Image: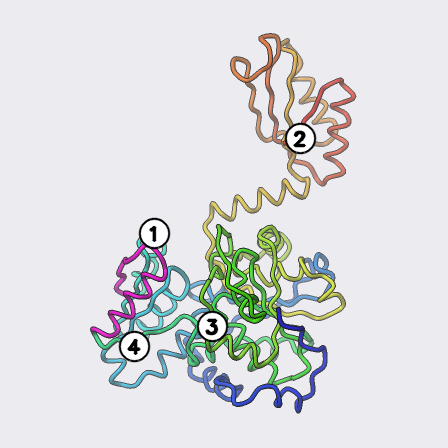
Amino acid sequence: MTAAAPDAVTATAFASRVAAPPVTLAEVRAAAERIRGAVVRTPTIQAPAVGRAAGCEVWLKLDNLQATGAFKERGAANRLALLSAREKATGVVAMSAGNHAQAVARHASLLGIRATIVMPRFTPATKVVRTESWGAEVVLHGETLAEAAAHAHALSLRDGLVFIHPYDDPGVIAGQGTMAIEMIEDAPAIDTLVFPVGGGGLLAGCAAAALEINPNLRVFGVEVEGYPAMAQRLAGRPITVGGPTVAEGIAVRDVGETPFALLRQMGIEVLVVPERAVEQGIALLAEGAKVVAEGAGAAGVAALLSHPARFAGHRVGTPVCGGNIDARALSNVLLRQLLRDGRLLRLHFDIPDRPGVLADISRRISEAGGNVIEVKHQQLFGAPTVQSTELELMVEVRDAAQGAAIIATLEAGDYVVRRG
């Protein structure tokens, strides 16, 4: 990784290390004027519960409240507004399996521009339907994002369509940078900004704008450990990425060359967080801030939880940059976090097969304040002998201390308890 930017950087020093950047504050301000009214100016709120968990003051920029549920509208709206009359008449093409697809589709529809979106064949049907609902033509092609991108470029050349890149385009980057201007205006106390990194457009645009407004701001990016492509590029290491992640919105191998150049010039550090921290961030936002975030949208909070020494005592702003998470995935994340926190217990027993034993176990749990929410009782298969029964309970408790007390009262009744 690159060395961290110093806490205080003078305007002269900042100017000397960034020579003629492709995106400037003036361009980001111009983008803000272009997209005014087409994109929601989302609120920036202080989140005390998140701050207590992270050990710093935290402000959240709620871009999950955009019409398509993600920040991608900013860049798409600005890039489309920059098209010439001839380009608008011809139409645009984009490649995406997620938020960029819907953003381009929506804003092309608002401007009366024909949009073609190429999505890989594996794209979930719900994402295809949402994109089509904004008026775009969806073409399913290829098994991977790279194959879909190649087909989108082929359509661009064949039909004269303007290719709208999700992150490697100065117009898109400037549009994404409008988020930083709003955060600084709405929460001027912020001294540190943290942005999720996929292709790098959001971080590059926001860092360029923020550091020109206030060179003393600290700006960080964050990637999930399975996909640390930008951190690896900045450190000059080979790109090694892969594996499943709940933060699929930032699961990118090929980062943008323009964002990469900007971040390298500005000396921005990209932090890497474990998958588990992203799940913790989703759960903390849901419970503590009452905010629904997708994995990529919770990555900033994951950075605060994973690198507390970097942020202790600081006033940190980070975006919930997307809220498009599958309901089943959200449910699983929340349940997994309850298990990790000790607020759900999975208890396994081999109990004697005689009347009253299950009732006694239930009574002991109830008297200790636990709530049995699931019971699996197996007599015929799995039990070690025909004289015993295999029992599995899911028990809801206040906290880990109450869970320990429940296990103690069960063991006091001579039950052998195994936690699962």
Dot 4 falls on a residue whose secondary structure is strand
Q: Which residue lies furthest to the left in this view?
A: 158
**Residue type marked 1:** Phe
Residue 244 as seen in the image, left or right of residue 51: left
Q: At 61% across and 78% down in the image, what residue appears?
A: 267
The image shows residue 277 at horizontal and vertical percentages of 62, 53
Which residue has dot 2 on it? 419
Amino acid at circle 2: Arg
Label count reads 4
Mark 4, residue position: 162
Mostly what secondary structure, the magenta segment?
A: helix
Q: What's the CA distance linking mark 3 and mark 1?
A: 31 Å
Give neighbour class at mark 4: few <14, some 14-19, many 20+ (Cα, 10 Å). many
Instruction: Find out whether residue 34 is within the magenta segment.
Output: no
> Which quarter of the figure is the N terminus placed in?
bottom right
Q: Which of marks 3 and 2 is in front?
A: 2
Magenta part of the chain: 136-158
- The residue pinned by badge 1 equals 122
- Is residue 146 one of those drawn in magenta? yes
Determine which residue is flagged by label 3. 40
Q: Distance between the residues labelled 2 and 1?
A: 38 Å
Question: On screen, 70 above or below 263?
Answer: above
Q: Quadrant of residue 100?
A: bottom left
Q: Three-letter amino acid code at disc 3? A: Val
Local secondary structure at mark 1: loop
